[in-house]
Image (cartoon, rainbow, N blue to C red):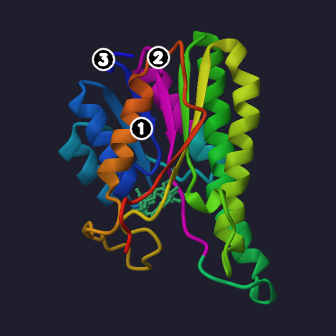
Amino acid sequence: MNLQDTYHLVTGGSAGIGKATAAALRAKGAHVAITGRDEAKLRRVAESLGALPIHADVAQAEDVERTYQILEEQWPRLDSLVNNAGIGGGHASIDELDIEAMRRVYDVNVFGAAMMGQKAAQIFKRQKAGCLINIASTAALKGYAKGTVYSSSKWALRGMTQCWQADLRPFNVRVILINPSEVATAFGDPERKERTAAPNKLSSEEIAHTIVAALEMDPRGFIPELAVFATNPW
Ligand SMILES: NC(=O)c1ccc[n+]([C@@H]2O[C@H](COP(=O)([O-])OP(=O)(O)OC[C@H]3O[C@@H](n4cnc5c(N)ncnc54)[C@H](OP(=O)(O)O)[C@@H]3O)[C@@H](O)[C@H]2O)c1
């Protein structure tokens, strides 16, 4: 797909992987809308990218509704949803699990992604075209000690991806899962401070490049799932 003049919604586009993806899409001449919860940061980043800011929390049904209302009013079509907004789950072994904290992570990583995906799918089915990209994690491939909350939320997103692929392929809609390994961002930092790329970690640009490459493939084909690792993490 030639991305020039195409239309893309990136959730959590005000930092890290989402911001780099929005920038990479803008560099291809695409129109991009970004969402986030911190309104000042969202507006600052949107202005620097020439993107449309939509102040919205993916975990809030009314915010999801409003996001798509704005897009349907302002844009003629939607070519992709990058379901990227996500939060960490901390570290807790089975005996330390806090179920309320687990629900809060699922509200964003699972139910938020499901609500965003459901609305996008309605548009894509109508258009008989579209691409839904879910950003999970290598934590969706293998569990690890103290990882129940985050890892299981990303396994759920991976499961939803496979179901949506089966639901949507007959409508010419591509659903793609991308599983990054560790990326230097503000992820998991309670102060939300951006991390600078370390030589042994991925940077947001590698994931943005992966997303753009998946979108650019002719819509005749799609990549169901791919993982991205740092070449030499040691
Ligand atoms: N960094 C990693 O090592 C890594 C590895 C694998 C997968 N991932 C996944 O990649 C995605 C992006 O992570 P990142 O590293 O770029 O994180 P990040 O630097 O913390 O950025 C997260 C972005 O999502 C937004 N966001 C968070 N919760 C939101 C919500 N409920 N509604 C709307 N926007 C929300 C944040 O903005 P506000 O704070 O203003 O809401 C921010 O723009 C996540 O799904 C994460 O699980 C990250």
Q: Left or right? Give the position of 176 relative to 93.
A: left
Of callouts 1 and 2, which one flags the residue occurring earlier in the amino acid sequence? 2
- The residue drawn where x is 25% and y is 33% is 26
Residue 137 position, x and y percent, is 56, 56
Q: Could you tell me which residue is drawn at 35 percent across and 60 percent down?
A: 202
Which residue is outermost to the bottom?
A: 95
The residue where tag 3 is placed is: 5
Label 2: which residue? 77
Q: Residue at x 35, y 33 (%)?
A: 32
Position of 130 with respect to 212 (left or right) is right
Choose mark 1 or mark 3, whichever is in front. Answer: 1
**Dividing the picture into quarters, in which one does residue 54 lie?**
top left
Alpha carbon separation for disc pair 1 and 2: 19 Å
Please tell me which of labels 1 and 3 falls first in the chain.
3
121 shown above or below 43: above
**Residue 74 in which image quadrant:** top left
Residue 170 pos. (x, y %): 72, 13
**Residue 171 within the segment the image draws in magenta:** no
Q: Residues within 10 Å of mark 2 (few under 14, many from 20)?
A: some
Locate the N terminus and report the quarter of the image it occupies. Answer: top left
Mark 1 highlights which residue?
Answer: 211
Please state the extent of the stretch shown in magenta in the rendering: 66-89
Which-is-in-front pick, marks 1 and 2?
1
What secondary structure is found at the residue carrying circle 2? loop
Say which amino acid is labelled 2: Arg
Secondary structure under tag 3 reads: loop
Quarter residue 134 falls in? top right
